[in-house]
Image (cartoon, rainbow, N blue to C red):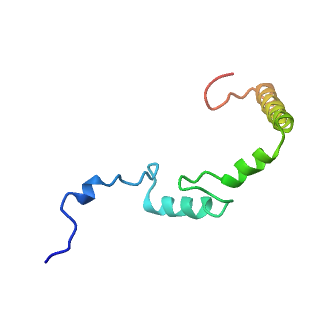
Amino acid sequence: MDTQEPVGAALDEEPEDRLGMTDEEWERFQAYTRGYGDQDENGVDLSLLRENLRLTPTERILKLQRALRLQWEIRRARSAAGLRNPAGRP
């Protein structure tokens, strides 16, 4: 008896989304993104989630405020240099 897969079985599988990358680019991307913390099946870095969950709510807010201050400083510096951001907003 033949034990091959049914002809339509391969059609049921979703193709891997390679973000429009060539095989070579995809391999480099995979090598670059693997090994950075504990990742789930979607590549989400679980170690960063765990790190943030160890913080108290107040510590998380302070961390966010530092990041926002940095973002505003970058915007001010970019504006002072006469540059626009990639999205085209001032």
* 43 lies left or right of 57: left
Relative height, residue 38 to residue 64 (above, below):
below
* Picture residue at 51% right of the left edge, 64% below the top: 27
Q: Position of residue 86 (x, y in %)?
A: 63, 32
Residue 83, picture quadrant:
top right
Q: In which quadrant of the rendered image does the C terminus lie?
A: top right
Q: Position of residue 47 (x, y in %)?
A: 71, 54
Single out the residue that lies furthest toward the top. 90
* Picture residue at 80% right of the left edge, 34% below the top: 64
Residue 59, picture quadrant:
top right
Single out the residue that lies furthest toward the left. 1
Q: Position of residue 77 (x, y in %)?
A: 81, 30
* Picture residue at 53% right of the left edge, 56% below the top: 41
Single out the residue that lies furthest toward the front. 1
Total labels: the figure holds: 0
Q: Nearer the viewer, residue 76 or 63?
A: 63
* Picture residue at 26% right of the left edge, 59% below the top: 10
Q: Nearer the viewer, residue 84 or 63?
A: 63
Q: In which quadrant of the rendered image does the N terminus lie?
A: bottom left
Q: Position of residue 48 (x, y in %)?
A: 72, 50
Relative height, residue 37 to residue 78 (above, below):
below
Q: Nearer the viewer, residue 75 or 35?
A: 35
